[in-house]
Amino acid sequence: MVQAARSPGSTLKPFLYGLALDEGLIHSESLLADVPQSFSGYQPGNFQANFSGPVSVSEALQKSLNVPAVEVLERLGPQRFVSLLRRGGLKLALPQGAAANLSVILGGTAVNLEGLVGAYTALARAGVSGQPRYFADAPREEARMMSAGAAFIIRDILEAGGPVARQLNDGVGARRGIAWKTGTSFGFRDAWAVGVSDRFTVGAWIGRPDGTPNPGFFGANIAAPLLVDVFAVVDDSPPGPRTPPTSVSTTRICWPLGTRSESTPPELCHQERTAWIVNDTAPPTFADRLRGGSPRYTDYRDAASGLRVRAACAAGEMTAVDMARWPAALEPWLDAATRTRALPPEWAPDCIGARAPEGGLRIVGISNGATIRRAGNGPAPELSLEARGGQEELIWLLNGRQIGRVPAGRALQQRFSDAGRYQITVMDDAGRYDRVEISVR
C-alpha cells in the first residue's frame, strides 16, 4: 500500500503555493478570493461548503481552501504544475490519455505514499526532495522541488497556524516545530497526513485497498492523530534555530492592489499586511477575472454634496478621487468599513441613470431589514428567493454558505428553521451581486 497509486486530496497544495512563489506569481499575503467561482465550467467548493471571502495565500493554505488553490493553479497552469512536480521528483499518474486540468490540485491525479513523503522532505531540506531509501547503501535519488526560500516560507505557513497546527499544539507541543498538511480524497476513499520536523518526515495514509469509501474518515480526524502519535514517539527533540535564507525577506503590502505599502498612496491601501517575499519580488493582486479595466481608477464627486457624478451630468464643480478596486467577486464580502473606502458613493440625482459596478442584479420580494415571524407552533418559515437582472446562473449564499445554484429567473426555496439574523446574498458569474439582511423570530 505504500506504493499504491491513490488520490492525494489536498496534500499537493503546499507545492502549488511554493512553486507559485518561485514563479513570481504570489507572496505569502497575496489577495485571493474564497468565493463561489466558475473556472470555465469547473465549480470547486470547500470541504465545509462555506466561503471566507478575501483571504491571503497563508490563510488559504492553513485552512486548506479549495477555490483559492484552483485560482492560483489557473494562473500557474495545470500542465506546468504537473511538469514541475515531476521534475522535482514526485511522480503523478493521470488517467490514460488525459491532460492535467484544474482538478489536479483537489485530488484529480494519483500519487503514492512513498513518493509523497519523499516530496515533503523538500520543506525541511531547503527545497530538495528525496526518495525514501530502505537500505543504507542504496543510491540517493534527489531533485530540487522548489527554491530554499519558497520551502522556508511554506514550512513557516504550515507550522504557524491553522486547525492542524492547533491540534498539534494541544498534542505533542509547538516546540517541536512540525509543519504538516492533511488531505481527503473524493468520497472519503483516502485520508492523508504528511509532516516534517528538523529530523524526520512522516506520512500517514488511511484507506481501503480496494478503494471503497470510509464515510466520515478524513485527513484531519483520522490520519492527523496518527501522525501526531508517530512524531511523539520518534522525535522528542526541540527544533533547532531556523533563519530565513538570504532570498527571503518581509515587506508591508496593501490590499486590494497587492503592492508595497511604501509605494501605495494611503487612500488606496485599504488593508495592510506583512508578507514573506522571495528575491525581493512583491507581485500585485491577480487581474480581475470578472471585470476588465485597471484596479486603479479615478472617480468624480460633486464638490458640494460628495455624491458621484460624471462630466455629462454634473450640476456643479467636480473633484477627482483616486480609487482602488477590489476584485469584483470579493465586493459582496467586504465589511462595512472597507466598503466605505472601496466603493464609490451613491450617484447624484442628475446622474441617477449611471450604474454602479454591482448594479443590475437585485433581490426581489424581500426587503432589507425585514423581520420574518413564525406562526405560533407552525412550521418553520420558508422563503422563495428570487432575483432580477442576473445572467445565466445565480449563486445564493446564506451567511456566507452556498445554499444553491439556479438558472437566472428561477426561484430558490429556503427554509429558516432557527431564529436569528441572516444575510442573504445573490451573485452571478459576471460579478454582479445584491444582498439583504433579515431577522427570523
Image (cartoon, rainbow, N blue to C red):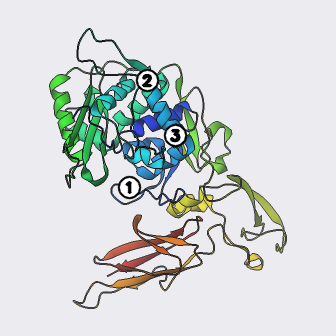
Q: Which residue is mark 3?
A: 79
Quadrant for the C terminus, please. bottom left
Q: Nearer the viewer, residue 413 or 206?
A: 206
Left or right placement of residue 414 versus residue 17 in this view: left
Q: Position of residue 275 (x, y in %)?
A: 51, 36
Q: Amino acid at mark 3?
A: Gln
Place of residue 434 in the rendered image (x, y in percent of width and height, measured from the top left):
54, 72
Q: Residue placed farthest to the top in the image?
A: 137
Separation of residues labelled 3 and 2 (CA atoms): 21 Å
Instruction: Give the mark, 3 or 2, whose residue is nearer the N terminus.
Output: 3
For the point 39% across and 83% down, the residue is 383
Residue 236 horizontal/vertical position (percent): 19, 22
Q: Nearer the viewer, mark 3 or mark 2?
A: 3
The tag earlier along the polypeptide, 2 or 1, is 1
Badge 1: residue crowd in 10 Å (few <14, some 14–19, many ≥20): some
Q: What residue is pinned by disc 2?
A: 127
- Between 387 and 305, the one lying in front of the other is 387
Q: CA distance from mark 2 to mark 1?
A: 28 Å
Q: Secondary structure at mark 2?
A: loop
Residue 276 shows in this picture: no
Whether the residues at callouts 2 and 1 have beta carbons within 8 Å, the answer is no
Q: Is residue 407 visible?
A: yes
Q: Which residue is mark 1?
A: 46
Mark 3 residue element: helix
Residue at 28 percent across and 33 percent down: it is 113
